């Protein structure tokens, strides 16, 4: 226990050294900015002496920017340079003793401090025990979580818990208390907070929801597949596998069989947004297979339009006569057939 | 008046000394600072040990409260 506490304290001491900053470049930066600012004042006063309004405005703007920079930089450096807390060795020993009582066993191997939780079940899905590990030598990732006997989500073995992917816990509401506990050497609290997160399911933002833990079922064929191979029908918003989804030939949208149409002329799959209905036969047609009657402007499929024998344009059944003449051509023909009244 | 160190590992967190009257139980302290009726949703430790809710807080005690349910993301 003492050995572990010493190692922990050493890790805090090392971290404190990393956090200490060298103020020399900061001081030089501030000095340069101050000299610039002073230069601006001198020029401003000269501009004022000679009543150069525009020059004064420019110098004033430059001085204000310099003040902002000085203020922001100084404030940032003061905030960053906080004295790091190094916990007392006896406090760390007490923390480790509490940790042992809370979890039953504390392990320290290769500078990794770990405990194992009890088996966790969320919404009747057993996820097993989890090993929470603090790696004292890893500065990139201080801790990680391993499933002891993983029961990962279908299609992604890295997701062993709704809020863990590849050992990384998405801390959510635990972010601040975790940081605070670690920073203040409250090691037992750190592990207890992690345990509380593991024992809680947040359905609002998991990596993979428990509902889909064993795969997502296709609404059509019932096959289970992972979330990356599932398509949502843009019509009914149900979920379908890649075998059961159909793509609209016009817009490329994904649809199920119920929500997609077939163009009655060319046979292509078309969604309701890309299709229209023939005003005569009522069949679905795509835009490429739809035509407009030159007379009434209605939309028809090619099969329902007739070419006028006179002008050669296409007309619907309502706008062409039995002789396959449009109204205009029919009138012309009537005119031509009238006997001459000339004497 | 007695002083206890109170650490709350909930939400934004809290860690500071609180003044309490002599004879204040853990239950009363918890209900005053966290809320009545929710003790079963928290791990309450005094000086790093679980205690009964009738435990009377002493000067210098360290009280830690950790929610048993914390939502990850």
Image (tube, coloured by chain):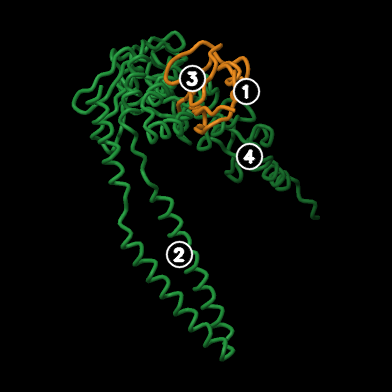
Chain colours: A green, B orange
Q: Given this view, does label 2 or label 3 mark the residue nearer the observer?
A: 2
Q: Is residue A134 above or below residue A33?
A: above
Q: Residue tagged by mark 4?
A: A293
Label placed on residue A257: 3
Q: In the structure shown, which secondary structural element does the residue marked by tag 4 occupy? A: loop
Residue A318 visible at all: yes
* Residue contact between numbered discs 2 and 3, judged by CB atoms under 8 Å: no
Tell me the element at label 1: helix
**The image quarter in which residue A227 lies:** top left
Q: Nearer the viewer, mark 1 or mark 3?
A: 1
Measure how far apart labels 2 and 1 are at the Cα level: 45 Å
**Mark 4 against mark 2, which lies toward the viewer?**
2
CA distance separating discs 4 and 2: 74 Å
Could you tell which of marks 3 and 4 lies nearer the N-terminus? Answer: 3
Q: Residue at x 59, y 28 (%)?
A: B1
- Give how far across and how far down residue A82 sits, in percent: 39, 48
Q: Determine the chain carrying the residue at label 2.
A: A
Q: Which residue is at the front of the view, A203 or A242?
A: A203
Q: Nearer the viewer, mark 2 or mark 1?
A: 1
């Amino acid at each position: 226990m003492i050995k572990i506490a010493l190692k922990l304290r050493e890790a805090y001491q090392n971290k404190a050294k990393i956090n200490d900053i060298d103020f020399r470049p900061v001081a030089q930066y501030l000095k340069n900015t101050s000299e610039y600012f002073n230069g601006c004042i001198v020029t401003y006063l000269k501009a004022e002496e000679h009543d150069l309004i525009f020059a004064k405005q420019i110098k004033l703007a430059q001085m204000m920017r310099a003040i902002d920079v000085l203020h922001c930089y100084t404030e940032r450096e003061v905030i960053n340079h906080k004295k790091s807390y190094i916990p007392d060795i006896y406090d760390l020993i007490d923390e480790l003793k509490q940790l042992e009582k809370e979890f039953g066993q504390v392990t320290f191997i290769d500078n990794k401090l770990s405990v194992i939780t009890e088996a966790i079940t969320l919404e009747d899905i057993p996820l097993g025990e989890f090993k929470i590990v603090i790696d004292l030598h890893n500065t990139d990732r201080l801790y990680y979580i391993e499933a002891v006997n993983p029961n990962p989500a279908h299609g992604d073995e890295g997701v062993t818990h709704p809020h863990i992917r590849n050992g990384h816990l998405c801390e959510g509401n635990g972010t601040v208390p975790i940081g605070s506990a670690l920073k203040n050497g409250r090691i037992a609290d750190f592990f207890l907070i992690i345990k509380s997160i593991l024992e809680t399911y947040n359905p609002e933002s998991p990596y993979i929801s428990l509902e889909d833990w064993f795969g997502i079922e296709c609404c059509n064929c019932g096959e289970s597949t992972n979330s990356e191979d599932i398509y949502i029908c843009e019509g009914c918003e149900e979920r379908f596998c890649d075998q059961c989804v159909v793509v609209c030939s016009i817009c490329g949208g994904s649809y199920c069989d119920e929500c997609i149409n077939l163009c009655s002329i060319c046979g292509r799959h078309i969604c309701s947004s890309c299709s229209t209905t023939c005003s005569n036969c009522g069949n679905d047609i795509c835009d490429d297979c739809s035509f407009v009657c030159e007379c009434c402007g209605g939309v028809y499929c090619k099969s329902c339009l007739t070419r006028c024998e006179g002008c050669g344009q296409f007309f619907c059944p309502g706008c062409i006569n039995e002789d396959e003449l449009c109204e205009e051509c029919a009138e012309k023909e009537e005119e031509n057939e009238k006997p001459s009244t000339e004497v | 008046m007695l002083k206890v160190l109170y650490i709350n590992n909930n939400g934004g967190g809290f860690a500071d000394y609180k003044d309490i009257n002599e004879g204040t139980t853990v239950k009363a302290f918890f209900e005053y600072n966290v809320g009545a009726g929710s003790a079963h949703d928290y791990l309450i430790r005094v000086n790093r040990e679980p205690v009964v809710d009738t435990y009377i807080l002493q000067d210098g005690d360290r009280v830690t409260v950790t929610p048993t349910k914390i939502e990850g993301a």
